[in-house]
Image: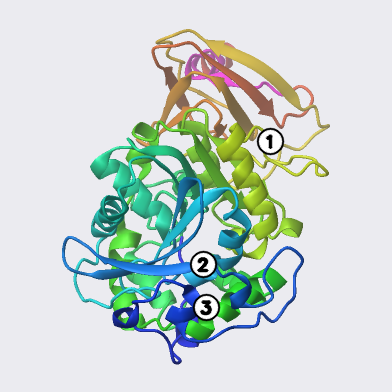
Amino acid sequence: MIKPVILLTALLGAGVSANSISAESALAVLGADFTFPNQLEGLPAKLSDFPDLQIHAFKTSDGVKLAYWEAGHGKPLIFVPGWSANGAEYINVMYLLREHYHVYVLDPRNQGLSAKVDFGLHISRYAKDLKDFNDHLGIKSAYYCGWSMGASVLYSYIDLFGAEGIEKLVLIDEPPSIVAHADWTPQQRLSAGSIADSPDEVIRAFTSGASNSILAALNARFNAMDSPYFQNSEGFARSFVKNDPKYMIGIMYDHASNDWQDVIRTKIKVPTAIFTGDYSANVPSQRWMHSVIPGSVLYVYSKAEQGDHFLAFKNPVKFTKDLQSFLNEGGTTVSSEDRIGHKEILRADAAWNGAPYMKYPVGTPEPVVAEITIPAHGELLWHSHPMPSFAYVLAGEIAVEDKQGNKQHFVKGQVMPETVNTAHRGTVGDQPATFIVFYAAVKGMQLSTTDADKATSKSIDKERP
């Protein structure tokens, strides 16, 4: 996902140039102290209360000077920020984690305190910058956390260099594909997390202010500034960091154009935690990622827990606690101890082939729940359902198609929103497939009808006097 351009204009005041980075302590590099607007328990009241926060710089293999923020000791934990973001915004996260890990935040080229250049504006180059950063530090093994576009940088890094050296991976609220393919169904768009039909639509939203409802909601959550933690970190960033939109917009076209579903599905084999929240439009795509990354852990924050695109900064105490749980113990819990876990697996107004649900059947309700198992390589007959129904895949996988040529593939953990009064069939793969199917039926209603049933019914009708 992406970070609103509203922040860009706020960051255009006096800032620190990448060429001025020479000293090590953040206080010395930034040249002034900073008093945080909210005094919060367990966090510094002033920048000078965080004396071990350091800022360094190095040159990439193509000669670009990148800044990075550093604090703490222990196992390396590397944060890769999202679009327009920088290490200053991680100050609360770094402070809370410094006693447990050697924390780094890399400012991407054209962001934060890093140099402004008009080349290398590709996610693949940003991945190479991360590789250069690792080589500069001599890091062979570390934990990695990517937020927003930073997660896409990690997708590219794994695609190019493999996952060797990534001991554990953390991904915060980044969809596999911001832009939808033209032939995708509504369900495919949801699984991919697509919010636009072209990169230009995304860029317009973050330059001219025009936006669709999803982007508008993202901006609204950022502008809410409803967290004192977020007020502190954003206030700090705005005071010292100078970003230039003309340089940062360049990467957005490439970022929005990428589809990482194949990488996520086939190349992420390390222990992985995925963070999202009920305010985010990305929840369906994060659930899809959870379903295809083996052994992954999904954290879905509630609205009360600031569960939006900025959850790590709006609720850093919970986030760092959950992060530590995952890094240290594997993250076996996905919700607070005092909160009932809630996972919305599917919310759909259309079937898997894009056909909208118009209404429920008329009659006395009689919902039916059935467990269905199809043997390996089984192929269902062409059939249809007279009511909305939903098949949760317990095991195995199935490919479905209709007679109009629409096709989709469902795997364990996904829900298939069935078509209504539309002939379709399914084919199972190399393993048996088991489903729990929920039918919104009424009394006396047949759950499904095959083409053979319809043909027999027509024959009988013809024979009647």
Residue 236 image-quadrant placement:
bottom right
Label 1: state its secondary structure. Answer: loop
The residue at the point 59 percent across, 80 percent down is 235
Residue that extends furthest to the left in the rendered view of this protein: 62
Front residue (pair 41, 448): 41
Q: Is residue 328 left or right of residue 167?
A: right
Q: Quadrant of the C terminus?
A: top right
Answer yes or no: is residue 354 visible.
Answer: no
In the image, residue 82 above or below residue 450: below
Q: Is residue 385 magenta?
A: no
Residue type beneath disc 2 = Leu
Mark 1 is surrounded, within 10 Å at the Cα level, by few (under 14), some (14 to 19) or many (20 or more) other residues, namely some
Residue that extends furthest to the bottom in the rendered view of this protein: 14
Residue 311 image-quadrant placement:
bottom right
Mark 2 is surrounded, within 10 Å at the Cα level, by few (under 14), some (14 to 19) or many (20 or more) other residues, namely many
| Mark 3, residue position | 237
Residue type beneath disc 1 = Thr
x and y percentages locating residue 337 in the rendered image: 79, 41
Residue type beneath disc 3 = Ala
User: Looking at the image, is mark 3 or mark 1 nearer the viewer?
Assistant: 3
Front residue (pair 431, 220): 220
The residue at the point 65 percent across, 59 percent down is 316
Label 2: state its secondary structure. Answer: loop
Q: Which residues are magenta?
A: 445-457
Q: Is residue 453 magenta?
A: yes
> Disc 2 versus disc 3: distance between alpha carbons?
14 Å
The residue at the point 48 percent across, 33 percent down is 271
| Mark 1, residue position | 333
Q: Earlier in the sequence, mark 3 or mark 1?
A: 3
